[in-house]
Amino acid sequence: MDVKVSSPKKIDAHLREIITYLELDESKANWMKVNKLNSFVPEATFCHLNVMVKMGYEKGLPQFGWMLAQDKSMNFSEAQFHCVWKSPEGELQDITPRVDGEKRVLFIPDDKRAIGLCYYENRPAIYTFDNVRLLGKQYITELRRIKIVPETDMFEKYGIEFFWKASNK
């Protein structure tokens, strides 16, 4: 199956099915531009780590939620667990660049779910959620917790491993 997902221009019935499945509040949907930063260079696909680094520079908080995308030609929709930075003033900013270069994403906050910090084979790891994928009327992947080990040098470069040590005491 060769799908090419992108951020939708509007929320349709297919995306609404995923929003309902995840028990999200559609009224909080936000089309967000990906912001460029001066304080550091964020890495694509590492939203949780990017937000931790940003918090080290400018305080703020992580806002967990779901980034929605679809390929209408394939009747395919997807929700990816995501993290954006919430400024001390409460403004949400997506700071993670996209591999596909997309400049705008659809994000819906999820105040019920968050990542967990852990170790796997002596390396920092993250408990997060797998992508939820809907093809036609059938879920091909459902909501489930997964553990990932980020393959990046951000821990050493920005000294963010202290988050793991503090959370695993």
Image (cartoon, rainbow, N blue to C red):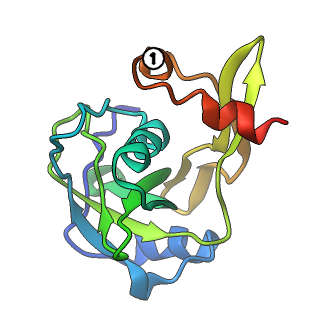
Asked if residue 59 shows in the view, the reply is yes
Q: Residue furthest bottom?
A: 27
Reply above or below: 166 against 70: above
Q: Nearer the viewer, residue 136 or 131?
A: 131
Quarter of the image for the C terminus: give it.
top right
Closer-to-camera residue (120/15): 120
| Residue in the foreground of this view, choosing between 32 and 116 | 116
Asked whether, in this view, residue 153 is left or right of residue 119, the answer is left
Residue name at image x 58 percent, y 77 percent: 20
Against 29, residue 142 (above or below) is above
Give, as a three-letter code, the residue at label 1.
Thr
Residue 101 is situated, as x and y percent measured from the top left of the image, at 16, 37
Q: Residues within 10 Å of mark 1 (few under 14, many from 20)?
A: few
Q: In this rendering, would 53 be left or right of 38? A: right
Where does residue 5 sit, x and y in percent of width and height? 30, 46
Q: Is residue 93 left or right of residue 140?
A: left
Q: Please name the residue that numbered disc 1 is placed on.
A: 152
Q: In the structure shown, which secondary structural element does the residue marked by tag 1 occupy? A: loop
Residue occupying the point 62% across, 22% down: 149
Q: Along the horizontal axis of the image, is 33 left or right of 115?
A: left
